[in-house]
Image: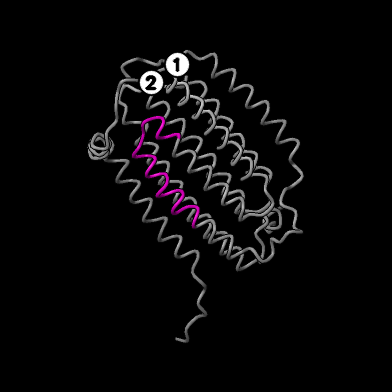
Amino acid sequence: MIILPLPHILIFSLLLFAIGIYGALVRRNIIGILISIELMLNAANINLIAFSKYTSLAPETGQIFALFVIAIAATAAAVGLAIVLALYRVRKTVQADEVHLLKW
Amino acid sequence: MPILEIAAKYTTYAVMAVILVFALGVVTLRNLFHCALCLAAALIGTAVLYVVLQAEYLAAIQILLYVGAVVTLVIFAIMLTEHLAGKTVRQNNSQSLPAIAGLLGFVSLLTALILKTPWPVTPTALQAKVLVMGLGKALMGDYVFPFEVISIVLIAALIGTVVIAKKDQPEEKA
């Protein structure tokens, strides 16, 4: 049984994605930016699952790609946080605008 | 049972609203630890939404991987770097207003597009039920190549993480 119209779910995930973009643009803390990127990946996942439920001819496809997105998100978080830790050890800061060694 | 269906519908809308509130908390709260907790709550709400969309396996994976692993990693990183990011440090740069303006345009444009597009919602797709067995067969059949690629990506990323994050040892004398 399906209870929601598809555009409502799409608009919801659009709002979630926009909130994630806002966080990634506005945050100074690198960990905050990473958290916002996780939100954006999550919004994309909701879209994949909604499409697989409502429109797909092979209904497994959307869910399998959502699985791949979750795995990629986990690797992104692990690598990103490792970079943050290495950066913190060298520069003693986690603010994105204080890391301006390569900024002209 | 129309009453049950109406109740389920509005409960789902309430879950969506709660997820959006927690997502706003993720991007606006000053204390990063609270942000991570809000992220965990938003991800659990998303898992509830997956159950509503009849993707129960994905809901389990979401809680196991996102809430269990990713949020734990984030909290670890916050704990290890928190000393300098105290209460007095500014958490936002000065780009809030341009970002909000741009995002309003983005959201209104995409909303208009979503409402205009004739989505091909077919009754056969609505009736289809995805079982875990079907997912497993698809992973081992049609999608075996991306499956193998992603396992290589995972192992490479994990080794790379260890290499990046480990302390630089001072050079041993030869």
Q: Quadrant of residue B55?
A: top left
- Residue shown at 72%/30% (left/top)? B101
**Range of magenta residues:** B49-72
- Residue shown at 33%/39% (left/top)? B57
Task: Report the side of A99 relative to A70 (left or right).
Answer: right
User: How many marks can you see?
Assistant: 2
- Chain ID at mark 2: A
Which amino acid type is marked by label 2? Answer: Thr
- Residue shown at 32%/27% (left/top)? A59
- Chain ID at mark 1: B
Tell me the residue that label 1 is attached to: B119
Q: Find residue A21 and report its horizontal and vertical position in percent.
A: 61, 38
CB within 8 Å, label 1 to label 2 = yes
Q: Which label number is shown at residue A55?
A: 2
Q: Find residue B149 and report its horizontal and vertical position in percent.
A: 33, 46
Query: Which is the main secondary structure of the residues drawn in magenta?
Result: helix
Vertical order, A37 against B9 (above or below) = below
A41 and B161: which is toward the camera: A41
- Residue shown at 35%/46% (left/top)? B150
B117 and A102: which is toward the camera: B117
B129 and A63: which is toward the camera: B129
Q: CA distance from mark 1 to mark 2?
A: 8 Å
Using a 10 Å C-alpha cutoff, classify the residue at mark 1 as few (fewer than 14 neighbours), some (14 to 19) or many (20 or more): few
Which amino acid type is marked by label 1? Answer: Trp
Q: What is the secondary structure assignment of the residue under circle 1? A: loop
Does B56 appear in magenta? yes
Does B58 appear in magenta? yes
Task: Report the side of B14 relative to A63 (left or right).
Answer: right
Task: Report the side of A27 relative to B169 (left or right).
Answer: right
